[in-house]
Structure formats: structure tokens, C-alpha cells
Image: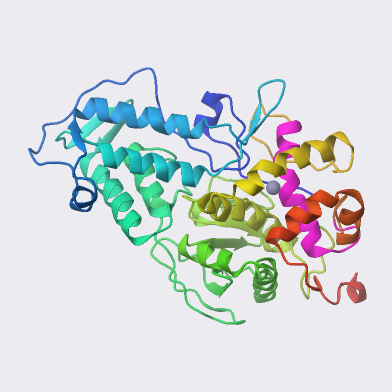
């Protein structure tokens, strides 16, 4: 079955990367036509107060130097392949604590420097604004003081530098839903302006689930229950999911283009949420619940496993995971243990190869482990099978996910 990340966007292409584990960054035009025009300066210092209190030693540097250095530092983080898989052809499946690395870079930035006075600065085709710089610096410094998640600082950084913000699903383009405890009850969605499409709402495990009128309540209840189970061994994951405003945009249609945030995305199953995205997506018709006895993969579980990588593991700097998962994937693929007959909805010009298989291994195997239903996946469909055929993987899965009994889609046998 098709289970997929969203298509890859432009910085990836320009760097020759295939980005599977991290949200893709677009629009960072590092080379060519940087015309260094800057509009008249306001005459005020750009160091924001919260940063000045923390980092009085930071030095003012000319805005052009500052912005080019910042862009360079960001490219270094994006290009960090410490934990990535690189194929013999040079294709890359990314993996690593990018959120942690970005925060380290941001702190290094604001603690050592700030730009000289400017109102706006032209970088490539984009005008970077001083007010967006100040928001970025303020999020970094206040977030550092408050122990906040890296999300708001990264969103503000990308907004300032115009990175990924041309993508409709970028979090800077949408207001957040409030988090309301609902218990196991679908309620009327408290939708912000622009997201009135969503009329149904439920929460659980720190995650917000929203759907339009076509999404059955039963699918949302089943999705919620599966994420509560998925996160039951590590309740601290729920806190991180909640503080990063993780939301699942559910749909019951051919593809994601029915959703307001993703009108140009035609992903049939769904895609994961990166730390600066508005939400992840999942097709309710691909779930198993009373009235829809679908015996196959589960897109909510699968995409949430990717989302936990992007949001939770990246924030926790979970190097134990990064150091092991791709080695296990390569071994399972080379030994023929991991089924590679699945198909992916790839970007134009991309073909499925080792980086795609390596990038999907963890989400597909955890999905099978959690459902624990013979035949619902081609391989890794039950815990018993994984214990016998991929025992080191079982240990890694059980480090993060529950080993308690759970029945996925009770009633399936009576209706299939
Ligand atoms: Zn996937």
C-alpha cells in the first residue's frame, strides 16, 4: 500500500538530496543573484531586549554580512549528514536531530551577533524584514529562557529567511487550533480563520485531530485510540507533541487537495508533519474502524511514526535512535527481510531506490508492530514475525513503543 511523505521541495533538489526524515526546506537561494540592496535604516539597534539581557557581549555586524553568514550556517545544518544514508549514487535519506542542531545554531547566532540597523534587505528575490529578524531573535532568546520547544524559533527563522514559506502548509501561514481536552468525544471544531473547512475536532495523547464534514466520527475515534496506544509507553512524548502543536488533518477523499492547507498537494494516503508544518495528514478511508473494515496499512499510525521522528526525536536529540536505525534498515533490505514491493508517490524525476527504502523502514515496521495483524503488511506484520526475523529492530521499537497487549481494529474478523 502506498504510504508516504509529501513530495520534496526545492532546496532538496538544489542540494541533490532526497529528504525523507526531515521537512524539506525551500527557497534558500544561497548563490546567484543576491543584490545587496537594503532599504533605509531606522537607526535603532536590532538586538532585541531578551537577547541583550542574555547575551550582552553580542556584536553588531553589517546587515549584509550578517544575513549571508546566517544563510551559510543554515545550509551547514541542512547539509549535516552525520546520521544520513548516502547511496553509492550520492542520493541521501536524511536522518538526524535537525531541530536540536538548528537551536544550537540559532543560539550561537544571537549570542555572538546581530545585524546593523535595517528595515528590509533584499536577498535573491526576497525582501527580508527587520521585524521578522526581531521575531526570530526574540523567539530564540525567550524560548531559551523558558525551555520552550524549538518550533516557534524555527518557524520565525524560516519566515525571516523566506525558507519553505512559499509552501502552503508552512505553519507561519495558519493560525493554531486551541488544545481542548475532549475525552473520547468528537466536538464542533474551534477552527481559526481560514480553517473553517474543519468542523470536527477531538484530542488525545497531546495531539489534535480535525476533519471536515465528510470524515466519519468513527474514523476520528479510531485514529485517536491508535495514537493513545502508540504513545502509551512514553507519556513524555505526548507533552512534546502537544507543545509542538501536532495536529492531524483528516480527510475522506481521493487525496489531500481537499484540505485548505494543502490545496496543491495530491497525496492519496497522507504525509507526516515536520516541525514547522501546520499539520500532518491522513486519509480516513485508509483506516480500519466500524463501518470501514480496511485490512491493510494504517496511515495515521504510519505518518505519526514519521512525525514523532521529526518532532519528538529531533527535539530530544535522540542519538541512540539515529545511530542505529539506518544500519538496521540497510541490513534488513540487503538480507531480504524488509519487503520493498511498496510503492511511493514521489516527486517528478525521482525513482524509488535504497534511500527511499531506508527512509521508510522505521515507519513501516513500527506500523506493522503496532497493528500486530497477520497480513496487514507485507513484512514485519506481527511482533512474533519481527522477533524471529529482525530481533534487533524489535529491541529498538520497544525502547519507544508499547509492548502491552492491544487489539487493533476489534471486530475485523467478523466483517471482512
Ligand atoms: Zn512513510
Residue 35 position by quadrant:
top left
Q: Which of 170 and 19 is in front in this view?
A: 19
Would residue 37 appear left or right of 170 to someone viewing this image? left
Q: In which quarter of the image is the C terminus?
A: bottom right
Would residue 279 appear left or right of 72 to someone viewing this image? right
Q: Which residue is drawn at 81% across and 73% down?
A: 405
Q: Is residue 186 magenta?
A: no
Our reading of the magenta stretch's main secondary structure is: helix
Q: What x and y, as percent, mark residue 131?
A: 22, 45
Q: Is residue 338 above or below residue 247?
A: above
Would residue 163 appear left or right of 287 to someone viewing this image? left
- Stretch in magenta: 353-376
Q: What x and y, as percent, mark residue 49?
A: 18, 52
Residue 327 position by quadrant:
top right
Would residue 193 appear left or right of 208 to someone viewing this image? left
Q: What x and y, as percent, mark residue 304?
A: 64, 58
Residue placed farthest to the top in the image?
32
Q: Which residue is drawn at 66% across and 48% down?
A: 321
Q: Residue at x 27, y 45 (%)?
A: 132
Q: Which of 8 and 311 is in front in this view?
A: 311
Amino acid at each position: 500500500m502506498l504510504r508516504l511523505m509529501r513530495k520534496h521541495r526545492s532546496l532538496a533538489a538544489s542540494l541533490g538530496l532526497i529528504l525523507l526524515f526531515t521537512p524539506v526546506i525551500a527557497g534558500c537561494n544561497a548563490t546567484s543573484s543576491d543584490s545587496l540592496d537594503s532599504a533605509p535604516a531606522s537607526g535603532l539597534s536590532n538586538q532585541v531586549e531578551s537577547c541583550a539581557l542574555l547575551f550582552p557581549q553580542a556584536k553588531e555586524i553589517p546587515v549584509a554580512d550578517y544575513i549571508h553568514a546566517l544563510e551559510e550556517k543554515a545550509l551547514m545544518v541542512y547539509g549535516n549528514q552525520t546520521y544520513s544514508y548516502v547511496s553509492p549514487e550520492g542520493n541521501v535519506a536524511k536522518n538526524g536531530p535537525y531541530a536540536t542542531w538548528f537551536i544550537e545554531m540559532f543560539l550561537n547566532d544571537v549570542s555572538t551577533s546581530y545585524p546593523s540597523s535595517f528595515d528590509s534587505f533584499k536577498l535573491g528575490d526576497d525582501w527580508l524584514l527587520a521585524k521578522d529578524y526581531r521575531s526570530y531573535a526574540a523567539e530564540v532568546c525567550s524560548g531559551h529562557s523558558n525551555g520552550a520547544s524549538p518550533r516557534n524559533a524555527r518557524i520565525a527563522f524560516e519566515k525571516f529567511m523566506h525558507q519553505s514559506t512559499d509552501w502552503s502548509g508552512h505553519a507561519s501561514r495558519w493560525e493554531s487550533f486551541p488544545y481542548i481536552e475532549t475525552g473520547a468525544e468528537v466536538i464542533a471544531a474551534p477552527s481559526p480563520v481560514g480553517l473553517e473547512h474543519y468542523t470536527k475536532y477531538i484530542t488525545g495523547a497531546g495531539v489534535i485531530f480535525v476533519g471536515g464534514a465528510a470524515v466519519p466520527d468513527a474514523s476520528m475515534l479510531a485514529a485517536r485510540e491508535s495514537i493513545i496506544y502508540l504513545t502509551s509507553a512514553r507519556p513524555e512524548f505526548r507533552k512534546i507533541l502537544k507543545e509542538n502543536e501536532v495536529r492531524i488533518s483528516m480527510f475522506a477523499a481521493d487525496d489531500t487537495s481537499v484540505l485548505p492547507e494543502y490545496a496543491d498537494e495530491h497525496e492519496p494516503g497522507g504525509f507526516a508533519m515536520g516541525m514547522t508544518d501546520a499539520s500532518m495528514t491522513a486519509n480516513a478511508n485508509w483506516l480500519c474502524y466500524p463501518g470501514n473494515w480496511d485490512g491493510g496499512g494504517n496511515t495515521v499510525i504510519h505518518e505519526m511514526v514519521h512525525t514523532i521522528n521529526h518532532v519528538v526525536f529531533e527535539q530530544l536529540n535522540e542519538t541512540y535512535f539515529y545511530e542505529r536505525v539506518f544500519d538496521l534498515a540497510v541490513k534488513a533490505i540487503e538480507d531480504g527481510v524488509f519487503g520493498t514491493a511498496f510503492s511511493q508517490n514521489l516527486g517528478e524525476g525521482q525513482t524509488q531506490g535504497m534511500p527511499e527504502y531506508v527512509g521508510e523502514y522505521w515507519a513501516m515496521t513500527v506500523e506493522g508492530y503496532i497493528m500486530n495483524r497477520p497480513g496487514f503488511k507485507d513484512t514485519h506484520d506481527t511482533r512474533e514475525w519481527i522477533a524471529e526475523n529482525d530481533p534487533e529492530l524489535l529491541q529498538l521499537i520497544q525502547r519507544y513503543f508499547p509492548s502491552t497487549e492491544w487489539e487493533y481494529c476489534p471486530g475485523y474478523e467478523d466483517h471482512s
